[in-house]
Image (spheres, rainbow, N blue to C red):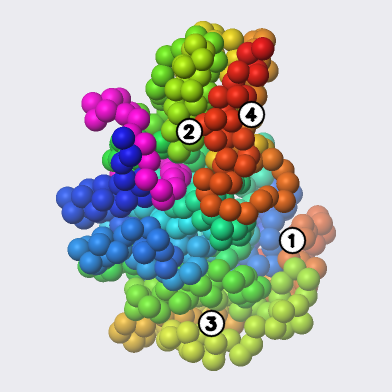
Amino acid sequence: MIEKANLEVFAETLLDLAKKDKEIIVVTSDSRGSGKLTQFGKELPDQIIEVGIAEQNLVGICAGLSAVGKKVFGVSPSSFLTARSLEQIKNDIAYSNHPVTLVGISAGVSYGQLGSTHHSIHDLAVLRTINNINIVVPSDNFETREAIKEAVNYKSPLFIRFGKKPMLKIHDEDDNFKIGKGVKIREGSDVMFITTGETAQRALLAAEILHKKNISCSIINMHTIKPFDNDLFLDCLSKVKAAITVEEHSENGGLGEKCASIISQSNINIAFKILGFPDEYMTNGSQSDVLDHYNMSPKKLAEIAEDILK
Amino acid sequence: MDHKELELKSIEYRKTILDIIYNGGAGHTAGSLSCIDILNVLYNNVLQINPKNFSSTDRNRYVQSKGHTVEALYTVLCDQNFFTREDLDSLNKFNSHFIGHPTRKVPGIEHNTGALGHGLSVAVGMAIGFKLDNKPYKVFTLLGDGELSEGSIWESLLSASKYKLDNLVIIIDRNGLQITGKTEEVNPIEPLLDKFQSFGLCVKQVNGNSVSELDEIFKKIPFENNQPNLIIANTIKGKGISFIENQVVWHHKLPSEEEYNKAIQELNKQLENFE
């Protein structure tokens, strides 16, 4: 079943929470429209701060608001938020230890044909190297809603990123969600897809294709990239013959390399493949076309899974 | 404190700055000497920040955006009893929290700074937060003049003006020098007054090494309702030690034993001559 865009769920959830909690403040950089926060601005004008197109200033102001007791959500396109203001994230949020939630909207290649200036295929890698900030990449509406709810009173700096396209429903409303805990979303014994965020739905569709070919496929969604749930990852890894990571991110420094690092330090011998964007001058196209082009269509994922099992 | 007491404090503070830098083996000597009078007046007469109220959110704030002159800040915080002189003497030693830039691991430090052009945005955020809650607290931030080349400063000024932050007090330590040379030769920033005024700030100029002038100007805050306050504090880099004053080389220079002794002698003489 197709649900809403995670972006919409984020905005609705935040508005609901902020209506009940006056300490919640949203900071935007001319991004209330693209962040679906227009309604928030209309209903709670005293709880939204607009800094204009100035992402460095946005992050600094978030830190200052947090320092005087506010529960702060800084919302800006992930590309600009995590590159242009990286030093503010490092020093003013993470190093200074202000529990701000930074929300990277239109993440990955969500901006499609707008091109590489707007894509954020670096954000997970750069923030993984910053001490004292955690990273969450929700897959579906449920995970997005739960992540935002948990973020309000989260005790350390947090980065959450998602896209803006409608998502497949993966979870039921009574499922468990906790930042730092990965989720097994499908059981299987031959091959495992490890996803983070919105690539989970592509893996689910691939698993259906594999099922028809009698290949048993498990999927774990590592919605929290940092701190990483090593236990779930290793436990699930021990039950399959091969593993493939799938991320809407550079192959460098993201989910795949995180998993590779754990595997290489755990004396495990398993067929393993990383799927993401290669280090090249990338092609142009819609988000879906670009993901398909770089071997992340459900059909291609299924083929790669078959190959790796041979 | 009256102005005489403040003047005496300034001499003592300068001795401490020289001591801790000499013993710690490194420090931003000249910049700490240029801004120490500002910190002196702020902490003794204006901020009302002390170890008792520091953990409360209901108090004034001070963010030192020019983080590198942390030796001046440590010196004043020590005098306010945030920590002991023994603690401070661990400056730059292995495992000490007292490092070459402000860190919140040190009691009394509001925000971690060091990379330039950050503190003003944070101060703006704090000031907006107080405004949102209708709280009467003020936010003070100290910027270097070399730091003004950072674009993020000017982003922050736009927000300060937009949100009419008359509870924000920006102080520029205008000593005219930076690590390479004169600010006006490295990257000219004048006319500063016009620039700040055109950004919507209410600007005053003072002798930033005169505790009495500083004390008087701080009493006039807010200068205008609904306008952020900005003070251009004209200072002398290295102020108080004859051979350090206005010398580019002293930006991050460690005094030799001879230079240290000579500097302390000069300061002792100032103490002896103090009426």
Residue stretch in magenta: A152-177
Name the residue nearer the viewer: A257 or B215.
Answer: A257
Q: Residue at x 17, y 50 (%)?
A: A20
Q: Is residue B258 left or right of residue A157?
A: right
Q: For the residues marked 1 and 4, what is the alpha-carbon distance in whole angstroms?
A: 48 Å
Name the residue nearer the viewer: A172 or A100.
Answer: A172
Q: For the residues marked 2 and 1, what is the alpha-carbon distance in whole angstroms?
A: 56 Å
Q: Was residue A160 drawn as part of the magenta stretch in this picture?
A: yes
Closer mark to the observer between disc 2 and disc 4 = 2
Closer mark to the observer between disc 2 and disc 1 = 2
Closer mark to the observer between disc 4 and disc 3 = 4
The residue to which callout 1 is attached is B252
Three-letter code for the amino acid on which mark 3 is drawn: Ile
Three-letter code for the amino acid on which mark 2 is drawn: Arg
Q: Is residue A24 left or right of residue A254?
A: left
Q: Which mark is residue B232?
A: 3
